[in-house]
Image (tube, rainbow, N blue to C red):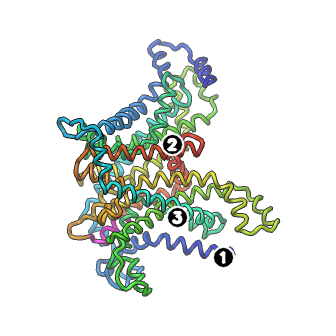
């Protein structure tokens, strides 16, 4: 029984991976091999030619740099703002706190797609269309509420004693937040940070709307646009580009599986 | 809350200079200011702006108030209804077939063997590589002439003429259903797996001693205990499917002949191909109301607010 279930598991797993394995196989084949029938899985003359030529036709290096910058800056800002607000929500009562918390909560119900049109007009007015900063603003708005709740929950779960003794020693609330609470929140910083970065790295719709020049496009958009090549799709190049686009996320995933699954599943439950 | 504020009051000691003390008293508000600014400036304001836009004929200089005309035009547009219908179609398949498949796979994954671990990794992989990459990989698999799918079917002697998976009005919708399920199963089966692992092993063991077979144990033990997870997965799939855009936009763009159109592709076309911002905003507001209703149903169903 166990052997049978294992065999079924392996068969399903391989079948599930077929599109990805085929993508990788194609990326390493020279052009004539890609279109030779019958199709074969293992490249007979493995080559990196598709990778070089895709770097020539599309500025993948540029896309990479853009995605890295946008993803990095959005993650940094989200972590900073969310940990600050999360700390205030967990520890510091102030006028309007309940209303602000309620507002944050309700904002998770707004699908960002309804905000796209006003966002585009707003960013055009601010001259932020076609800059990484417009995208960063959008991503911070997109991922902040979830991050705030993650930090708030974590700070609520911490014992108060260390912070209280620091207060008695005359430390300001900012000092308590920065020097005591934040270093303690490392697990949450990791989980929220990975989640935000991978989401921003993969985000397509907002990036499609807010960038329309090669110089500012991110990877997913640059990749998808290879489809519209006037000379028809060059499948070898497209598959090589796809492999390059997903390698960083796969590496992060293999290294940090547990945090990433935790972040993604909690992120999904937010609705 | 009251305990917290008492404690905070007790801890609020007079400080050296009054300026620093004043800032310290306002710390809570100051720390939440950036988040407040994002909330108001990048969510609340755009939302109100979208609602206003939906009532005007947008022009760069002076937009003209036209009342409900955008909505009237929207509800009279056949393509909008096709898009909404397709969105419901994709959602129905994701929720029914996608959930059933996820639960079945989670049952397979919930065994302490290498094969089960490998299955877990394989099923989760699509969630990692992102929808745009997945769309490109599937485009190539679905290619009519040299695609892996058609070539495999031909070599098995199943089809003589190549199937136009994405280019025929009939097939496009079904091809998208396949890709949607492929992309969405990873996350939901991981959620199911977590739920399954919370079930005490003793329950299954004692049921086995009582002579219950696997089928009986599933319906008597696993299913009742997995119901909270099932509810969460159903809700995620319901709302997530409504918001699906990337793979459909990349693979078919809503075509051919609007047969795979969704409400979001319709919104994109009105807004960023025709630049009819007022009308597109009306599409957005209708979409918002549908999703908000679903989210509200979610919080009522799950008995707690979304987090």
Q: Which residue is the site of mark 1?
A: A3
Pointer 3 with pointer 1, Cβ within 8 A: no
Are callouts 3 and 1 both on one chain? no
Q: Which mark is on residue B97? A: 3
Q: Residues within 10 Å of mark 3 (few under 14, many from 20)?
A: some
Q: Tell me which numbered mark, 3 or 2, is placed earlier along the sequence.
A: 3
Residue B208 sits in quarter: bottom right
Residue plotted at (50% across, 13% down): B16
User: In which chain is the residue bearing label 2?
Assistant: B
Image location (x, y in percent) of residue A158: 61, 35
Q: Which mark is on residue B296? A: 2
Image location (x, y in percent) of residue B75: 32, 49
Q: Residues within 10 Å of mark 1 (few under 14, many from 20)?
A: few
User: In which chain is the residue bearing label 3?
Assistant: B
- Marks 3 and 1, Cα distance to the nearest angstrom? 27 Å
Q: Secondary structure at mark 1?
A: helix
Q: Is residue A234 magenta?
A: yes
Residue plotted at (44% across, 62% down): B180
Image location (x, y in percent) of residue B284: 35, 45
Residue A75 visible here: no
Magenta segment range? A233-243
Are callouts 2 and 1 both on one chain? no
A44, above or below A228, in the image: below
Image location (x, y in percent) of residue B192: 60, 57
Give the left or right position of residue A196, taking residue B65 as reference: right
Residue B180 visible here: yes
Q: Main secondary structure of the magenta part?
A: helix
Give the left or right position of residue B177, taking residue B81 as reference: right
């Amino acid at each position: 029984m166990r052997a049978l279930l294992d065999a079924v598991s392996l068969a399903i797993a391989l079948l599930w991976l077929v599109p990805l394995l085929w993508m990788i196989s194609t990326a390493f084949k020279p052009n004539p091999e890609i279109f030779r029938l019958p199709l074969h899985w293992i490249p007979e003359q493995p080559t990196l030619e598709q990778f070089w030529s895709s770097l020539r036709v599309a500025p993948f290096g540029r896309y990479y740099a853009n995605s890295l910058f946008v993803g990095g800056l959005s993650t940094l800002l989200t972590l900073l703002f969310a940990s600050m607000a999360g700390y205030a929500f967990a520890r510091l009562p102030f006028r309007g706190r309940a209303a602000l918390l309620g507002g944050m909560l309700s904002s998770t119900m707004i699908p960002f797609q309804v905000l796209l049109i006003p966002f585009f007009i707003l960013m055009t007015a601010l001259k932020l269309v076609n800059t990484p900063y417009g995208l960063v603003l959008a991503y911070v708005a997109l991922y902040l509420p979830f991050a705030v709740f993650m930090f708030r929950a974590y700070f609520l779960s911490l014992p108060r004693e260390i912070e209280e003794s620091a207060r008695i020693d005359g430390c300001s609330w900012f000092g308590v937040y920065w020097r005591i609470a934040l270093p303690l929140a490392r697990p949450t910083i990791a989980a929220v940070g990975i989640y935000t970065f991978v989401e921003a790295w993969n985000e397509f719709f907002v990036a499609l709307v807010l960038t329309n020049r090669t110089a500012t496009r991110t990877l997913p958009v640059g990749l998808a646009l290879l489809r519209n090549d006037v000379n028809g799709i060059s499948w070898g190049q497209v598959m090589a580009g796809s492999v390059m686009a997903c390698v960083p996320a796969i590496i992060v995933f293999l290294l940090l599986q547990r945090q990433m699954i935790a972040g993604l599943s909690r992120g999904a439950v937010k609705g | 809350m009251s305990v917290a504020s008492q404690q905070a009051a007790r801890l609020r000691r007079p400080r050296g200079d009054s300026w620093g003390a004043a800032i310290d008293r306002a710390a809570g508000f100051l720390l939440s200011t950036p988040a407040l600014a994002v909330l108001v400036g990048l969510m609340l304001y755009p939302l109100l702006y979208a609602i206003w836009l939906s009532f005007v004929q947008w022009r760069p200089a002076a937009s003209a108030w036209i009342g409900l005309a955008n909505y009237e035009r929207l509800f009279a547009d056949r393509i909008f209804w096709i898009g909404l219908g397709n969105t419901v179609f994709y959602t129905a398949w994701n929720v029914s077939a996608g959930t059933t498949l996820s639960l079945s796979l989670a049952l397979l994954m919930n065994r302490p063997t290498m094969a089960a671990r490998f299955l877990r990794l394989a099923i989760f992989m699509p969630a990692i590589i992102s929808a745009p990459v997945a769309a490109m990989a599937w485009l190539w698999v679905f290619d009519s002439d040299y695609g892996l799918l058609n070539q495999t079917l031909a070599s098995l002697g199943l089809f003589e003429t190549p199937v136009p998976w994405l280019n025929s009005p009939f097939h496009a919708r079904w091809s998208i259903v396949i890709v949607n399920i492929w992309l969405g199963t990873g996350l939901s089966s991981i959620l199911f797996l977590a739920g399954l692992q919370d079930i005490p092993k003793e329950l299954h063991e004692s049921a086995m001693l009582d002579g219950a077979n696997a089928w009986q144990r599933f319906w008597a033990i696993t299913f009742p205990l997995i119901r909270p997870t099932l509810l969460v997965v159903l809700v995620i799939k319901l709302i997530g499917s409504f918001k699906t855009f990337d793979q459909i936009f990349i693979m078919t763009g809503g075509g051919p002949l609007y047969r795979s159109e969704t409400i979001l592709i319709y919104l994109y076309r009105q807004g960023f191909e025709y630049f009819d911002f007022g009308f597109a905003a009306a599409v957005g507001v209708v979409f918002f109301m549908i999703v908000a209703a679903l989210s509200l149903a979610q919080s009522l169903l799950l008995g707690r607010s979304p987090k």
